Image (spheres, grey):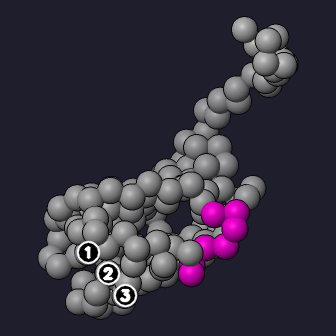
Amino acid sequence: MTAAIGLSVTAVKLAPPRVSLMTIVHSSASASAALANFDIKNSTAIQVGDLYMFSGMTAINLDTFEVSDGDLATQARLTLENFGVILQDFGLSLDHVVKVNAQLTNISDFPVWNEVFLDIFDAPYPCRTTVGAPLVVGEIEVEITAASTPRR
């Protein structure tokens, strides 16, 4: 059937997968105190090879540990700024982010989240997933997880 419509298939040989045996648990000074304040026990980031996978971050002031009472745009921006601070602890920046997951308490706020995302990140944009979900701390409107690599 493919010959009838003029399509051809070319085989592509892929390099064998690289498996890293090096796994490093990181704890950011900026985030560790906030986690301790809320009695949350998890790593700030896990590094496997060149990939850093970050735990969820919310709109918490990293100096006062207070949850922002702002709207979704304010909370999303503060959350991404928090990621920027944590990434700096690892010698990275938001430019190194390759994947973003966002949980919104109200999925109908996606256009607001989208506007903040497009304002913070430049093309090529990180991969992204956004879902609606109830969140566990206070009046939080958004929780964001991310992955980054120094090779972006």
Given contact means CB atoms under 8 Å apart, are the residues at marks 2 and 1 in contact?
A: yes
Q: Nearer the viewer, residue 36 or 11?
A: 11
Please provide the residue range marked out in magenta: 119-125
Quadrant in the picture for residue 141: bottom left
Question: To which residue does mark 3 refer?
Answer: 74
SS at circle 1: loop
Question: What's the distance in space between the residues labelled 1 and 3, CA to CA?
Answer: 10 Å
Q: Amino acid at mark 3?
A: Thr
Q: Main secondary structure of the magenta part?
A: loop
Side (left or right) of 107 relative to 39: right
Say the numbered circle drawn on residue 131.
none
Residue 146, horizontal then vertical, whole percent: 49, 59
Q: Nearer the viewer, residue 114 or 6?
A: 6
Q: Residue at x 73, y 58 (%)?
A: 152
Q: Residue at x 20, y 64 (%)?
A: 135
Side (left or right) of 19 relative to 101: right
